[in-house]
Image (cartoon, rainbow, N blue to C red):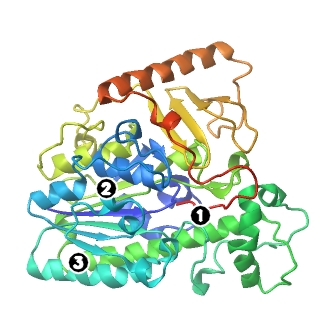
């Protein structure tokens, strides 16, 4: 059996047709979902890119591996096994079509015999397109098919990430309005420190693409949402080419395809415009699809809570590999193959962020609780409480009205953190030790691009 681990960066689950989105932004992804398992409740225990992918590669919660922010000084411990190392030790040809290891986190390359980094031609990882990646990936797959060599391949598409610049042939999709409609407004974005910077950079390019007066101001958020969906469709076409290549070279029947995202994107929800900070569902709930003909039933829907830390033990069980000792995830292979008796659902889900703002969040069967360790730049309360049953969109903060519930959940969160710190042998909460990496105060400091 081969493994094709395919990540589409910044992809929200609810913008895919297979998750109920009305726009035809994801026909290939939707077909893939119909041919295997679709997981409805796959959640990121750490955002954005570096915490999420670190968790996926080592099967550990961020509180254990310590990588809680984008960039930062923390590295994955050298004796921590990673997915590609485990598969390389088992005799697989391991290959990464990705640029995560070329920056400050070299451990993302650990265990890959082949590393193809198309960003070296670009100078910016965010600007690598699925077509550029496929130009190297598709011949690799064809060669593996010809040689009969089993492989573990990690593919990382960036297309839905800002700056939302799909090729011109996609620009007419999904929008029929007026980007400059005076009845609409993007002022909350422009007033924001990040938005003010973007107005000078990628939003300036977006404005140029409209052909309007450079002094004009974009006003309709839905125009930018359409650009995001166009990028999803572009990445989806890239995936279609990959799936076709698997078919053409006799690999489809014996290749486990696992498609996921590291985090989602807020598209003006919660006052967060076109970025991925904020511990809300739009950022945390991402797709997870799995296809392996003959093993994973077609059309299977899995509603159990799954997290990125479950991917490593799942793939280890699927390929009959040794499972590392110090991991926090559990194998979901029984769920994906239609056998539910081997799954123990977590009582709570705990996640963190420490890139633009420093926060923990805890979710149980009813409530979503957010605890800020320091004030954020939106002026949000230090405690937020949402009733997911009555308010799944997390629009009404009940913290002031339900103080007792807040105390209970805060105690549960603090207890969870203390228990995990003890189990991991850590002396302190890594969020309290870390500095926010992508925001520097006072005003006037440089804003770095977020991944």
Query: Mark 3 — residue?
Result: 141
Q: Which residue has dot 2 on it? A: 290
Where is mark 1, residue-wise?
Answer: 449
Q: Is residue 430 above or below residue 171?
A: above
Q: Residue 403, image x and y in percent?
A: 68, 16
Comparing labels 1 and 2, the label whose residue is closer to the camera: 1
418 with respect to 376 (left or right): left
Q: Position of residue 135 (x, y in %)?
A: 35, 85
With respect to residue 119, does 406 lie above or below?
Answer: above
Q: Secondary structure at mark 3?
A: helix
- Location of residue 220 (image quadrant): bottom right
Image quadrant in which you'd find residue 31: bottom left
Residues at marks 1 and 2, CA–CA distance in whole angstroms = 31 Å
- Mark toward the viewer: 3 or 1: 1
Disc with the residue nearer the chain's start (3 vs 1)? 3
Residue at disc 1, secondary structure: loop
- Badge nearest the viewer, 2 or 3: 3
Q: Earlier in the sequence, mark 2 or mark 3?
A: 3
Q: Position of residue 288 (x, y in %)?
A: 39, 52
Is residue 342 visible in the rendered image? The answer is: yes
Please give the label number shown on residue 412: none
Determine crowd level at label 2: few under 14, some 14-19, many 20+ residues with C-alpha closer than 10 A. many
């Amino acid at each position: 059996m081969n493994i094709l681990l395919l990540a589409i960066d910044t992809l929200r689950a609810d913008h895919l047709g297979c998750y109920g989105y009305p726009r035809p932004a994801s026909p290939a992804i939707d077909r893939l979902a119909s041919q295997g398992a679709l997981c409805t409740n796959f959640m990121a225990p750490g955002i954005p890119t570096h915490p999420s992918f670190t968790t996926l590669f080592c099967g550990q919660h961020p509180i254990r591996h310590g990588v809680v922010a984008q960039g930062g000084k923390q590295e994955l411990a050298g004796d921590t096994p990673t997915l590609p190392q485990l598969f390389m030790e088992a005799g697989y040809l391991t290959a990464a079509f990705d640029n995560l290891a070329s920056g400050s986190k070299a451990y993302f390359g650990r265990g890959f015999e082949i590393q193809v980094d198309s960003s070296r031609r670009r100078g910016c990882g965010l600007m690598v397109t699925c077509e550029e990646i496929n130009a190297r990936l598709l011949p690799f797959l064809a060669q593996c098919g010809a040689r009969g060599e089993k492989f573990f391949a990690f593919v990382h598409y960036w297309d839905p990430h800002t700056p939302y610049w799909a090729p011109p042939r996609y620009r007419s999709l999904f929008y029929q309005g007026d980007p400059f409609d005076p009845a609409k407004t993007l002022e909350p974005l422009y007033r924001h420190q990040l938005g003010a910077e973007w107005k000078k950079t990628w939003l300036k390019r977006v404005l140029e693409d409209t052909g309007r007066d450079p002094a004009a101001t974009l006003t309709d958020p839905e125009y930018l949402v359409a650009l995001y969906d166009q990028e999803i469709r572009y990445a989806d076409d890239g995936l279609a080419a990959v799936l076709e290549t698997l078919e053409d070279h006799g690999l489809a029947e014996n290749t486990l395809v696992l498609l996921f995202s590291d985090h989602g994107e807020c598209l003006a929800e919660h006052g967060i415009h076109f970025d991925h900070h904020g511990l809300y569902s739009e950022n945390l709930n991402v797709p997870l699809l799995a296809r392996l003909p003959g093993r994973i039933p077609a059309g299977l829907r899995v509603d159990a809570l799954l997290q990125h830390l479950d991917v490593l033990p799942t793939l280890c069980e699927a390929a009959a590999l040794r499972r590392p000792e110090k991991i926090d995830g559990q194998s979901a292979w029984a769920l994906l193959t239609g056998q539910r008796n081997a799954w123990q659902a977590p009582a709570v889900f705990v996640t963190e962020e420490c890139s633009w703002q420093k926060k923990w969040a805890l979710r149980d069967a009813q409530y979503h609780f957010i605890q800020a360790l320091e004030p954020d730049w939106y002026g949000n309360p230090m405690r937020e409480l949402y009733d997911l049953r009555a308010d799944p969109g997390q629009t009404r903060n009940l913290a002031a009205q339900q103080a007792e519930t807040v105390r209970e959940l805060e105690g549960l969160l603090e207890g969870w953190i203390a228990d995990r710190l003890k189990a991991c042998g850590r002396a302190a909460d890594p969020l309290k030790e870390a500095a926010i990496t992508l925001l520097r105060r006072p005003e006037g400091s440089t804003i770095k691009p977020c991944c």
